[in-house]
Image: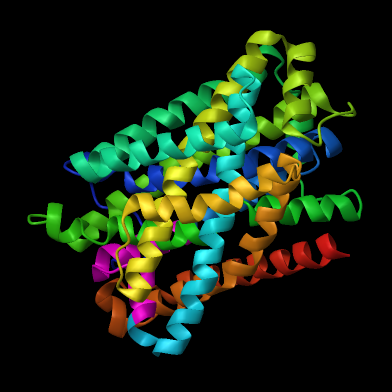
Amino acid sequence: MGHAGDVFVRAPRLPRSVGLLGPAFVAAVAYVDPGNVATNVTAGATFGYTLVWVVVLANAMAVVVQYLSAKLGLVTGQSLATHMGEVLPRPARIAYWLQAEGVAIATDVAEVVGGALALYLLFDLPLVPGALVTVAVSMLVLKIGDRFGQSTLERVVMAFLLLIAAGFTAGLVVAPPEAGAVAEGLVPQFAGTESVLLASAIIGATVMPHVIYLHSGLTAGRLGRRGQRRTVAELLAATRVDVVVALVVAGSLNLALLLTAASSLSGLDGTDTLEGVHTLLSSELGAGVALLFAVALLGSGLASTSVGCAAGAEVMQGLLRVQVPLIARRVVTVIPALAVLVLGIEPSRALVGSQVVLSVGIPFALVPLLWLTARRSVMGDAVNRRVTTVLAAVIAGLVIALNVALLVLTFA
């Protein structure tokens, strides 16, 4: 058996590890945020099953990245942001925090706007009041975590995931896709420049920097808090199960969105906005499916904006060693989202714009993560094996290259 740093060795038995599952599910919520919804639906409606393989590849890469993030926090007892705060001089630390905070705010824009849009679809609530309701509920979710502990927050997030799953898979139950077409979509292929742009957007919306920062923070206290009678290898085995299960769930939901759009919305006008998608789902698959889609979109916005806020707090505490009251953080981070809505910017365009900002931030999270987990002085016996480091480096290079392509194609 390989040492504790292995990703793909046979895991130790997990008779007592069920209670350790949960952090990856919190991170996984960000993988089904409104930005992912818009991107995957557009990909399926525009190119059918062509980009199925991209969703599968993106999710596989996310498994490796999130495992490394979780492992860093678990083994060292410190988050990625805290590690960077210790090694960077003050000017560089502040600059690093500014870009990370920008990523957190951009993420919040997408999630708050998505929640507001869902409330508009469900209750005809104007977007600005809807955004305020979304922020208020997200604060309540985080307060539950503060009051009753991280495990309670994890259970709340899992409940949100069940809600999201019901809404995003309903279309497949009503109109299942053709198995042969799905299988063909697993073969790597493109259909012109726009499909490359959407492929870049799918991967950019999947491997997200703020979730990398947060996941390491979620596992940082686990060894001391629950691991008195467990070895690091056992805890890492539980973490592998946690990450794989959570991200398979999230990846399946993203794939369900693409398949629903490919089988039922392909070639129809109006799929470039979430309002249009909701209308088309109602006309093509029935009002029930459209209702479940809107409810799932609301759950996606509420849960993911809670995760985004928690990620921003983790970054600030780790890099600046400053704790800001939750209400103060929410007031600051919600201002850009409210500005987007007050200015009348089309919500779906705001979602796409947020993905561009995430593209800028991804190297600043991926490269330090790979560097730290490959250092024996940091990780001890849990240091990455050479094959893991090579695999992670390939993933990082591919993700960064595709995000650069996304930036170039977007502005071109």
Who's the residue at 69% across and 60% down the image? Answer: 356
Q: How did the renderer colour the structure?
A: rainbow
Instruction: Give the quarter of the image for residue 208.
Output: bottom right
Left or right, residue 31 beside residue 325: right
- Furthest toward the left, the residue is 229
Image height of 110 relative to 407, above or below: above
Residue 193 percent across, percent down from the top left: 90, 56
**Depth check, front residue: 140 or 17:** 140
Who's the residue at 29% across and 41% down the image? Answer: 143
Most common SS among magenta residues: helix
Q: Is residue 37 magenta?
A: no
Residue 308 percent across, percent down from the top left: 46, 51
**Depth check, front residue: 381 or 120:** 120
Q: Is residue 66 magenta?
A: yes
Viewer can see residue 122: yes
Looking at the rendering, the stretch of residues picked out in magenta corresponds to 65-85
**Quadrant into which the C terminus falls:** bottom right
**Quadrant into which the N terminus falls:** bottom left
Left or right, residue 404 beside residue 255: right
**Depth check, front residue: 343 or 93:** 343
Who's the residue at 37% across and 59% down the image? Answer: 313
Residue 254 percent across, percent down from the top left: 61, 37
Viewer can see residue 169: no
